[in-house]
Image (tube, helix red, strand yellow):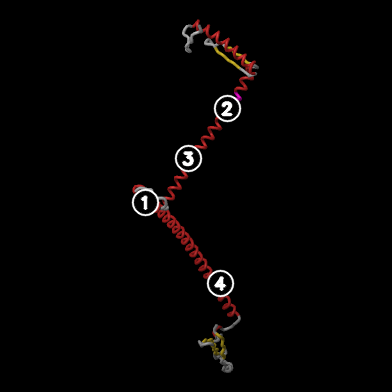
Amino acid sequence: MGRGKIAIRRIDDTTSRQVTFSKRRNGLLKKAKELAILCDAEVGLVVFSSTGRLYEFASTSMESVIERYSKAKEERQLVMSAASEVKFWQREAASLRQQLYNLQQNLRQLTGEEISGLSVKDLQNLENQLRMSVRNVRMKKDQLLEEEIQELDRKGRLIHQENLELYQKINMIRQENMELYKENQCQVYAAKGKNGTDRGSIVPYDFSITDGAAYKPIHLRLSQPQPNADGIKTEPPPNLRLQLHYRDG
């Protein structure tokens, strides 16, 4: 008769558990050694008993086996992480494509296209959305126009202030010119008084300009000389009448 099957569960009896551990441990170590020899495999086996005792087997050395295991585990994790990252970006790309399709569909509906399959409620929602969009556009336009008007007002005030400053400078220059003119006149009169010249005897020539049609003549009249300081009149000059014509334009 063959052996009966043993239930794979924890053995409650301490002695039986220790005997079973010892037998199966030796069999496991034997199988690991045979596997390494027969299949030219690098095998490392580590077993801790319930009491904390260590049992190990390595076909080469336990350090090399553990180092190789750590390296292989890291490479496997990288491959798995790369694969998971590729799957993540694939899901993201699919989601973005769906969002793009929805946006394009919404845009076409806003422009009045592809609305034949919409219900009355959907059309009402679309109309409300368009009204809201138009209101927002108008509000933005009014805001920009108001900002432009304020900017133009500010520039106008600056230009007006600059004009006032220029007028003040011009008035100051005119006042300075008048003062210089008066000062020069005083100096001229003072110089004539020192030379003994009577200002009353100097009578300027009288010029009269008459308007004409194509030619405008200029009439010059010579005034009679006044008696000088000694009461002696000079000979009257001959009566001269000059006409100067100039063409208008």
Q: Quadrant of the C terminus?
A: bottom right
> Alpha-carbon neighbours of circle 4 within 10 Å: few (<14), some, or many (≥20)?
few
Q: Earlier in the sequence, mark 4 or mark 3?
A: 3
Q: Earlier in the sequence, mark 4 or mark 2?
A: 2
> Alpha-carbon neighbours of circle 2 within 10 Å: few (<14), some, or many (≥20)?
few
Element type at marker 2?
A: helix
Instruction: Check disc 2 and report the residue beneath it.
Output: 76
Report the Cα–Cα distance between label 1 and label 3: 28 Å
* Magenta residue span: 70-77
Q: Earlier in the sequence, mark 2 or mark 3?
A: 2
71, 1: nearer the viewer: 1
Element type at marker 1?
A: helix
Residue 180's disc number: 4
Q: Amino acid at mark 1?
A: Glu
- Residue 141 visible in this rendered orientation of the protein: yes
Element type at marker 3?
A: helix
Instruction: Check disc 3 and report the residue beneath it.
Output: 95
Q: Amino acid at mark 2?
A: Arg
Give the residue at x 45% y 46%: 103
Q: Is label 4 or label 2 in front?
A: 2
Q: Amino acid at mark 3?
A: Ser
> Alpha-carbon neighbours of circle 1 within 10 Å: few (<14), some, or many (≥20)?
few
Instruction: Check disc 1 and report the residue beneath it.
Output: 127
CB atoms at circles 4 and 3 under 8 Å apart? no
CB atoms at circles 4 and 1 under 8 Å apart? no
Report the Cα–Cα distance between label 4 and label 2: 102 Å
CB atoms at circles 1 and 3 under 8 Å apart? no
Number of numbered callouts drawn: 4
Q: What is the magenta segment's predominant secondary structure?
A: helix
